[in-house]
Image: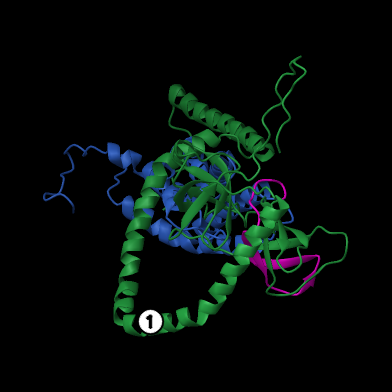
Chain colours: A blue, B green
Amino acid sequence: MRSPRRRGPFDEAPDSSIGRLLPALSVMTGSCVTIWPTIASFPFLPPVGLLMLLAWRLMRREALPVWAPLALGLFDDLLSGQPFGLGITTWTLCFFMIDLIDERLVFRDFWQNWLIAAGGTAFYLICGRLVAVPFGTHVDTVLLLQVLTSVLLFPVISLLCAWLDRDYEPA
Amino acid sequence: MAPSNNRRPGFSRRAQYGVFATYVFAVAGALVGAILLALSYFDPNTFGAARTAIAEVSAPVSSALAFVGRSVGSVPGGLGSYVGVRDQNVALRKQIADERAITMRARAINYENRRLKALLALRERVGVPVTTARLVSSSAASTRRFATLNAGAWQGVEHGQPVLGPEGLIGQVLESGPNTARVLLLTDPESSVPVRRTRDGLPALAQGRGDGLVDIRSVSNAAATFAPGEVFVTSGAGGVYPPNIPVARVLRRGRDIVLAETAIRPSTLDFALVQRAYLPAPAPAPTPTPVPTAKVKKP
């Protein structure tokens, strides 16, 4: 569709080094939303990097290696203002949880993807709240709203990932 | 379509070990991450160098985006003020005439105040400005309330300096890189500022809540009551913040602990003024010298 001539079945596959890096790059771009110039008085931005990561992982297992959330979580920790190490730990745990779920489930359709992503996002945000601020602070209502907006944003992020992945051809 | 559950990549032992090794690496990395998390739980400012290094790159981007936003956002206001400039002119003239008496009285009081202070031989410290810069971004995805300031150690910004806005206190510098600094905002749950009531000087603490508001906690022994609209300014206790800077305004009637809104809602549109810490931390005590005529340290 993109090339003027359709590639025949015996032609060589086009070079896809950017295609291989695309998932990681898009997750890092998602982490960069916090540099948007605004001074927030309460947490309103969803963790877009994590949503991107989960969308890629749930859409295509081999898009990112198992150790990818370590590096991507580290990058996110440096930008998000969450305590250092939170992204590294929780993002990797999310990957392991999805691996476990994949062992049990044969089929996954989008509703299950959404549910899994909702669980992962809530896990990340609640862990962040427990580590970052003392127990008695009044952030729980805004945290709930943040979780809700993040969960509602997941289909959009999934669509975006699917659009980025449109050129992918399985080997 | 059933997902291909290809955890086992065929019969090649080497490929199988490769997959196993990636899992071992991921688990080890997660454990290291947990240790890092524990470290940053006990000392939140660890790894500040890595964070400021990233901020050095991201702050110019934020700053450029903010500049574009300001330029575009100022167009409708500019058009509106061009149209309404005549009416505004009349209104402003009237306001100047109305306020002339107040200004004169304030000048007289100011003069008298200076004379009285001179009579008392009161030594007064003034807040020494360090630099003026804009806040360019903030931690909008986290429950902590940090902002990034577009000036750092090269401009003289250091840990612990107060950051002021046009209408009141913004916060305190937490860590500074070469060209950027991280500012702890007033509304952060870990922020606590000694304040006093403008009406009677009642001492209190303004503690951030994390949801954009602050709690005013009375620190005096007597039961304190607060009424909506009461203004709290910094007291200068603790030596970080200079006194008499507006901090918060009480929202609801209450006793001992009440809800208040901050005097300033920082935005990327305004400049922030960084000042020297009001009473800088004392230098480490010099090694005692046997000279008997040691200088008396001035307060």
The residue at the point 42 percent across, 55 percent down is: A36
In the image, residue B46 lies at what x, y percent? 60, 35
The residue closer to the viewer here, B122 or B89, is B122
As drawn, is A18 to the left or to the right of B197?
left
Mark 1 burial class by Cα count in 10 Å: few <14, some 14-19, many 20+? few
**Does B66 sit left or right of A85 as displayed?**
left
Tally the numbered discs: 1
Give the camera-side residue of B169 and A35: B169
Residue plotted at (55% across, 28% down): B24
Give the magenta part as a residue range.
Answer: B237-262
Residue B34 included in the magenta stretch of the image? no
Name the chain under label 1: B
> Up-down: is A115 above or below A14?
below
Most foreground residue, B176 or B46? B176
Instruction: Tell which of B8 and A46 is nearer to you.
Output: A46
Q: How far across and down, in percent of the image, does residue A111 sit? A: 50, 61
Residue A23: image quadrant is: top left
Q: Which residue is mark 1?
A: B88
Task: Please indicate whether residue B78 sits to the left or right of residue B237 in the image.
Answer: left
Q: What amino acid type is highlighted by mark number 1?
A: Gln
The quadrant of the rendering that contains the C terminus of chain B is: top right
Residue occupying the far right of the picture: B222
Rendered view: B170 above or below B8: below
Q: Is residue A107 visible?
A: no
